Amino acid sequence: MTAIVDVQNMGKVYDGGFTALGGVSLQIEEGEIIALLGPNGAGKTTLISALCGIVTPTSGRATVGGHDVVTGYRKARAMIGLVPQEIALEPFEKVINTVRFSRGLFGKRRDDKLLEKILRQLSLWDKRNARIRELSGGMKRRVLIAKALCHEPRVLFLDEPTAGVDVELRRDMWQVVEDLRKSGVTIILTTHYIEEAEAIADRIAVINKGQILLVEPTADLMARMGQKTLRIDLMERLETIPKALADYDLALAVDGMSLSYTYEAGGERTGITRLLQAIAAEGMALRDIQTNQSSLEEIFVGLIQDETTEDAA
Ligand SMILES: Nc1ncnc2c1ncn2[C@@H]1O[C@H](COP(=O)(O)OP(=O)(O)OP(=O)(O)O)[C@@H](O)[C@H]1O
């Protein structure tokens, strides 16, 4: 299958010499949700701005739906819906008019049926005659999505869709994104919230300092890099870790009532069987055991730190 978005070695050096993108390559398949995950200043907005023709790349190339984003700008842009980070809406305009106007900007014929479908999908139909300034922050964001969708794009870019949004609204937004995917739109979103990427993306591209560090299916990333911790609660208090268990890299809790063992969840050998046998051989009685999967957050922080350490070396 050919990628609907194909980025080849794209670079961006801003006037003044700052390299915001240092040769990024990325292929996005039709119908997927991909998250560009990275800290502030990583280059996420620059990348999507370059794909939308707002920023001119200084090297490399990219196509959207087969159209070059620079030489075939109009055709490429017609396939893209962009939901910007900043909420910039006309406060006195009615919801329906602002969305209708956006469609007109793409030279598309007025289509009230389509508008109704989009506004209903985003739970804005009841608010269609409300003025923008009367809406809550979450609704305003949904108006931005409606505006981005009204020219029937096949690819939707969401630049930090839930920045500054409370937890409940964030979940609503995740549902909106999932519903949009079901309607056939390919979605590329930027975020610094790891849990957001984990919750909704099929694949995650980790980006830092203008470089893509990895692109992987969310589940694989969790499985490949995820560590698990086995917590062993003891019946009796331990002063120190017994010598026979010294090879296991165990941590003893401050209260001496539990041991923690960290292992690679995806590894061929976890060492758990041997560890439990060694514990039994020591005559230690167990109260309980539990495992805990490390979150993508820890993985992400680990990746970014590795980069920083390598830079310093
Ligand atoms: N017009 C510009 N001129 C010069 N430097 C810029 C310009 N726009 C962005 N930058 C710089 O490029 C880097 C990448 O910015 P970008 O907005 O792409 O990052 P981001 O990953 O989207 O960050 P955030 O999560 O904070 O939005 C930053 O260091 C930023 O200061």
Image: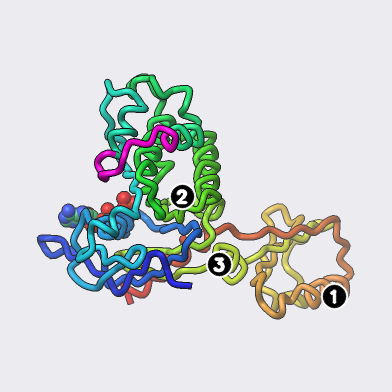
The answer to whether residue 166 shows anywhere in this view is no
What whole-number distance in Å separates the C-alpha atoms at marks 3 and 1?
A: 31 Å
Q: Secondary structure at mark 3?
A: helix
Asked whether the beta carbons under mark 3 and mark 1 sit within 8 Å of each other, the answer is no
Secondary structure found at label 1: helix
Q: Position of residue 187 (x, y in %)?
A: 44, 54
Q: Earlier in the sequence, mark 2 or mark 3?
A: 2
Ligand 1 is located in which of the four quadrants? bottom left
Marks 3 and 1, the one that precedes in the sequence: 3
Q: Residues within 10 Å of mark 3 (few under 14, many from 20)?
A: some
Residues in magenta, as a range:
104-115
Label 2: which secondary element: loop
Of callouts 2 and 1, the N-terminal one: 2
Q: Which mark is residue 75?
A: none
Q: Are marks 2 and 3 in contact (CB under 8 Å)?
A: no
The amino acid type found where label 2 is placed reads Tyr
The percent position of residue 8, horizontal first and vertical second, equals: 31, 73
Numbered circle sitting on residue 277: 1
Q: Is 229 on the left or on the right of 122, as rendered? A: right
Give the quadrant of residue 95.
top left
The quadrant holding residue 76 is bottom left
Evaluate whether residue 142 shows in this view: yes
Q: Nearer the viewer, residue 1 or 242?
A: 1
Distance CA(mark 2)–CA(mark 1): 40 Å
Q: Which mark is residue 193?
A: 2
Task: Between label 2 and label 1, give the one nearer the viewer.
Answer: 2
Q: Which mark is residue 221?
A: 3
Above or below residue 36? Residue 224 is below
